[in-house]
Every structure is written in structure tokens, then in C-alpha cells.
Image: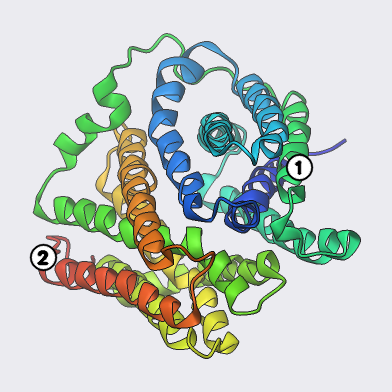
Amino acid sequence: MVSTRTKLSVMMFLQFFIWGAWYTTIAVYMTNHGMGTLTFWPYTVNPIAAIVAPFFLGLIADRYFATEKVLGTLHVLGGIFMFIVPRFTGNPTVFIVLLLLYNLCYMPTLGLANSLAFHHIQDQEKQFPLIRVFGTIGWIVAGLFISYVLGPVLGVVAEGTEWPVYTTATASILLGLYAFTLPHTPPPGAGKEVSVRSIVGLDALTQLGDRSFYVFIVASFLLCIPLAAYYNFTQLFLGNAGVTKIAAVQTLGQISETGFMLLMPLMFLRLGVKKMLMVGMAAWVLRYTLFSFAAPSAIIGLIVIGILLHGVCYDFFFVTGQIYVDKRSTPAIRGQAQGFLVLVTYGLGMFIGAQVAGRVFNRFLGTATQLTLEQWRSFWVLPAAFAALVLVFFAVMFRPTNTKA
């Protein structure tokens, strides 16, 4: 009989396989179909969905329906939307609206998958990371599958075709059907009162608010603005630099993320929260600087190092930030506080970042179909400089009262 832990691990694998299959390829696909000036829109509708997701979860999913049923229904519906997406490459507005509808289905499933897993394990700190790591593995496998399986089978660069989209759609429906076989998980908020303030996290902000916490929130929001450029434009940059296995090369970041996650407990002991966050911010500055230096001569080694920095960029900033918020919170407001952090970073920060990065990219692009390598050098300087300013702001202004931070 399959154990609950195995079932949950498979769920996490598929959950992030789905995201990795389209998120690292959609800009290349759009560029190949005459939508090169619109590639920032998938990375805009994704944070819009992240903003909407807490309201859906708090007001509906968490109160009235079993978690596994909502998870299954959303993935099946999202898979259907994704199957339709390639039919509208000639109509960019419908194409983007369909991606919005897909993301509105997908983004709530991130919280649903986590809450389902937490409900069926006894020791969250020890058991959950061993389950969640299969999500990172799923993202890695998605990239390798697209570059090393779909590519050779199709005989072309698969990232520029509709097949990564169809891969996402197929995996989404498979996970949707699989979700109905997961252990029953009753709605966690059944019978509880809920308000918009609590869903957004304003109640938690009121309780946690002091100078250091506000500085952390502002810095997190600001840093996510230049961060959006990486997720949108690295795949196009790799293509212009002559890389053909684009999705596979980007998985090096997730491989790095897995390794640095294992080092985090040791780093916390040596550095503390403030230095950990500063290291994470500095890694973003270094990544974009390496991209800028590498661009004119397409120095693949420097680009790869920049991608490998993802472990530091993500773990030391996002994961450390989540831990900082958790330590500041009480059990009563922990969920609200984490939800507020997601809203500020993945939601508002990434939304603004995608719009800004897209418009800057289009200014560089002009009437051309792609940037020159010299233009990429100038492009990457901008997020590097912005991230550096945020780092300086945080270093000067963040003064936690807890000496261990």
C-alpha cells in the first residue's frame, strides 16, 4: 500500500513540474510567434493571480470544500485552459487572457498543496522539507524533459514550440485526477469567521509592526521589482547567447537551490537573519552584474555562474524572509503574516517588476526582433543597480532589536 508521504511527494513533484514546464519557456514561445514585445504579460498575470489567490482560499476554498477536491478541480480546469492557449497565438489578447485564467486556477493550488501536506504529517519541520524537495525535483525534471526529450523527438528547439504548454496542460490534468485519490482533508476554515483584513494580513501587520519589520517589508517589496527581470528575460538572453537547451540550463538554478537549502541551518548559526538577507540581496546584484559582463561576448561560464547563484538568491532571501516572519509571529497570526509576505513579494512586487522590466525591454528592443548582446549588457545593469540600492537601504535601516537577528 502506498504511504501517505509517498502520495504527498508525488503531489509536490507534479505541482512544480507543471510550473517549471511553462514558466521558463513561454517567453521564447511567444517571441517565436510574433509576440516578442508582450513576453512580460505572462509574468504579470502570474502575480495578479497570486494577489487573488488568498481571497479565494480564505473566503471560499478553506471554508466550504475538502482541500483535495478543490486542488483536483482547479488543476483539471487549469489544464483545459492551457490546452486552449496555443490555439490563439494569432490573437495576443485572448492568448494572455487564457494565461490569466490558467494562473487564477494554478496559484491557489500552491497554498492548497502545502496545507494538504501539513494536515497529514506530524512533524512539520522534519517531514515537510523531505516532501517539498520533490517539488524542486519536479521543476528540474520539467526543464530536462523539455530540452533533452521533447527537443530530440521534435528535432527542433522545443522551448520555442507549443509542446511545453501542452506538457503543462497534460501534467495539470493528471495531477487534477490524482488529487482526488489523496487523503481526505476537510476545509480548515469551516465554521470560522473571516474578514478581508485577516486574509490580506493587515491584522498581522498591526501586531508585528515596528521599524525593523516595516523596513524588511519595504525592502522585500522593492527587491522583487528587479527580480522579475530574471524570470522573464533570462530565457531570451540564453537564446540570444547561443544556448539551445534553455530549459535544461535554467534548472541549474533549482539544483543549486536544493544544495543551499541544506546549508541554511549552518548559515543561520553563523550569520543571523540580517546578514542572511543581505547575502541574498547581494547575490541578486552579483547575478545581474555577471549577466552584464558576460553579454557582449556571450561568456557562457559567467552566465551559468549567475544561474547557479539562484540557490543563494532564493534561499537566503525568500526562505530566510519566511523564517524571519515566522519567528516574529504568534500561532494565531502566523498564516496571515505569511500570506501578507506573499502578497507583497510574489504579488505586488513581481507585478510591478514585470511591467517595469517589460517596458524597459521594449525600449531597448525598438523595432528589432531581439536585443543585441551589447544591448543585453546595458539591460542587465539596470536591475543590478536597483538591487544594489535596495541592499544599501536594508543594510542601513534594518536594525532588529533581537541581537540574534
Which quarter of the rendered picture does the C terminus lie within? bottom left
Residue 86 in percent (x, y) is at 70, 39
In the image, taking residue 296 as reference, residue 149 lies left or right, namely right
| 233 is higher (above) or lower (below) than 290 | above
Could you say which disc has been placed on residue 153 in the image?
none
So how many labels did they put on this image? 2
Residue 303 in percent (x, y) is at 53, 81
Q: Residue at x 71, y 73 (%)?
A: 244
Residue 165 in percent (x, y) is at 70, 45
Q: In this view of the protein, can residue 221 be seen by the observer?
A: yes
Residue mark closest to the camera, 2 vs 1: 1
Res. 157 image quadrant: bottom right
Q: Nearer the viewer, residue 209 or 27?
A: 27
Q: Nearer the viewer, residue 315 or 170?
A: 170
The color scheme shown is rainbow
Do tag 2 and tag 1 residues touch (Cβ < 8 Å)?
A: no
